[in-house]
Amino acid sequence: MNTSHRIFFQNAKKMKALKPGSIDLVVTSPPYPMIEMWDDVFKNMNPKVKTAFKEKNGNAAFELMHQSLDAVWDEVVRVLKNGGFACINIGDAVRTINDHFRLYPNHARILSVFHQKGLSPLPIVIWRKQTNAPNKFMGSGVLPAGAYVTLEHEYILVLRKGGKRTFDTADDRAGRQNSALFWEERNQWFSDVWMDLKGTRQDLIDKSVRKRSAAFPFELPYRLINMYSVKGDTVLDPFLGTGTTMFAAMATCRNSVGVEIDKNFLEIIDAQFGSIVGFSNNHISERLRRHEAFVKDRIQAKGPLKHTNQHYGFPVIMNQEKNLMFNPLQSAGKTGEGCFEIKYSEETEIKKSQQPEYSDESGKKRFQQLELKI
Ligand SMILES: C[S@@+](CC[C@H](N)C(=O)[O-])C[C@H]1O[C@@H](n2cnc3c(N)ncnc32)[C@H](O)[C@@H]1O
């Protein structure tokens, strides 16, 4: 099995290269309106944003910024298949303009636009992030009626185009079963509050790059891709940034398309790509190891499990987990600028040769640090 991955460095408001109904899943995080680090991006897209700030008109700036995103959401709706999902990570903003402090509810604005465009909103995930920010006590401190609660969460909006996806052929159904999650993962991942993801898994990029680029942790798109698509599907991220969604697609046997306005990200993406085989295969090993630990505890507490996974031979809770299998990455190659191809093994065993592949010394170091933690 192979997957292909392609990045377009352009504005996502017109994704001409993508045909209508060609995408199974969108996983993305746009620049956040009214968060200062993104002001210039919005001002460049629409100079009226600059005027709104000059006139100290927060409402107008908020609306104009969202209008730039609306153009991308139009494209998302166009390229999604019927039955396909869009998962959008977004945080609200708080800001003082003209001495007036208030919340700018980005998630509500985006949700209502998708609703107007005819997509069905599904239950939202709240991503709980602990902050140690100095604004933890906003407003009048311990004095009542003038203090504000601290924003310590973001949202993952989940939307569906059209009705439920169907799996009509025997191959479709087999592919779906092969892409199943473990029962215990399902319980955690389909919960509507995700506690801080930072500590859960390693990331391909270091903390400072992640912060500067506002990248989400690898675990976030990784879960969403596993939850809302099957192997062989195509995942789009119209705000690709450092490529986290694309790497999660590589690790999960999905194809991907990324769109990013800033070409400077290519260097970071190329550097991370050097570690993708070892990184993904370790992720797979870690999932398997966690499942085996879970099964051991479960059997000790409640006795033997009813079902056995046919690829790994270990016990599983549900019949639906019987055909679950992770394909180890075999090799990763560049086929052009911003174009990548991954080859997968059909065997469960992760061979030595499928372990680390480094493009440079820093990739090797990152991988070794990762190995120590596992
Ligand atoms: C919040 S960041 C996404 C970070 C990404 N999820 C990651 O893990 O690295 C938003 C990205 O969207 C890009 N961007 C902003 N406006 C855009 C547009 N109109 N079209 C394409 N990309 C855009 C920015 O350059 C930035 O990299």
Image (spheres, rainbow, N blue to C red):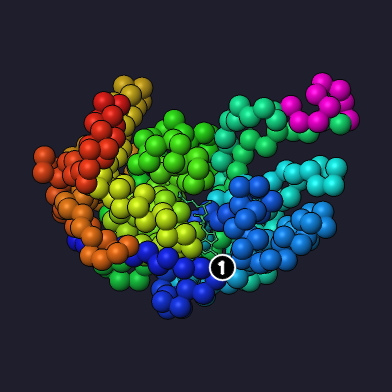
* Residue 65 image position (x, y, % from top left): 68, 61
The answer to whether mark 1 is within 8 Å of ligand 1 is yes
Amino acid type, mark 1: Val
Most common secondary structure along the magenta stretch: loop
Q: Determine the residue located farthest toward the right in the rendered image.
A: 145
* Residue 142 image position (x, y, % from top left): 82, 21
> In the picture, residue 95 is in which quadrant?
top right
Quadrant into which the N terminus falls: bottom left
Which one is nearer the viewer's eye here, 330 or 213? 213
**Label 1: which secondary element:** helix
Which one is nearer the viewer's eye here, 54 or 367? 54
Residue that mark 1 sits on: 72
Which range of residues does the magenta coloring cover?
A: 137-145
Q: Classify 264 as above or below 318.
A: below
Q: Classify 201 as above or below 4.
A: above
Q: Classify 273 as above or below 149.
A: below
> In the picture, residue 119 is in which quadrant?
bottom right
Quadrant into which the C terminus falls: top left
* Residue 219 image position (x, y, % from top left): 41, 42
Determine if residue 355 is in view: yes
Other-residue count near label 1 (Cα within 10 Å), few / some / many at <14 / 14–19 / ≥20: many
- Whether the magenta-drawn stretch holds residue 372 is answered as no
State the residue at coordinates (58%, 36%). Answer: 128
- Whether the magenta-drawn stretch holds residue 143 is answered as yes
State the residue at coordinates (62%, 39%). Answer: 153
State the residue at coordinates (30%, 71%). Answer: 169
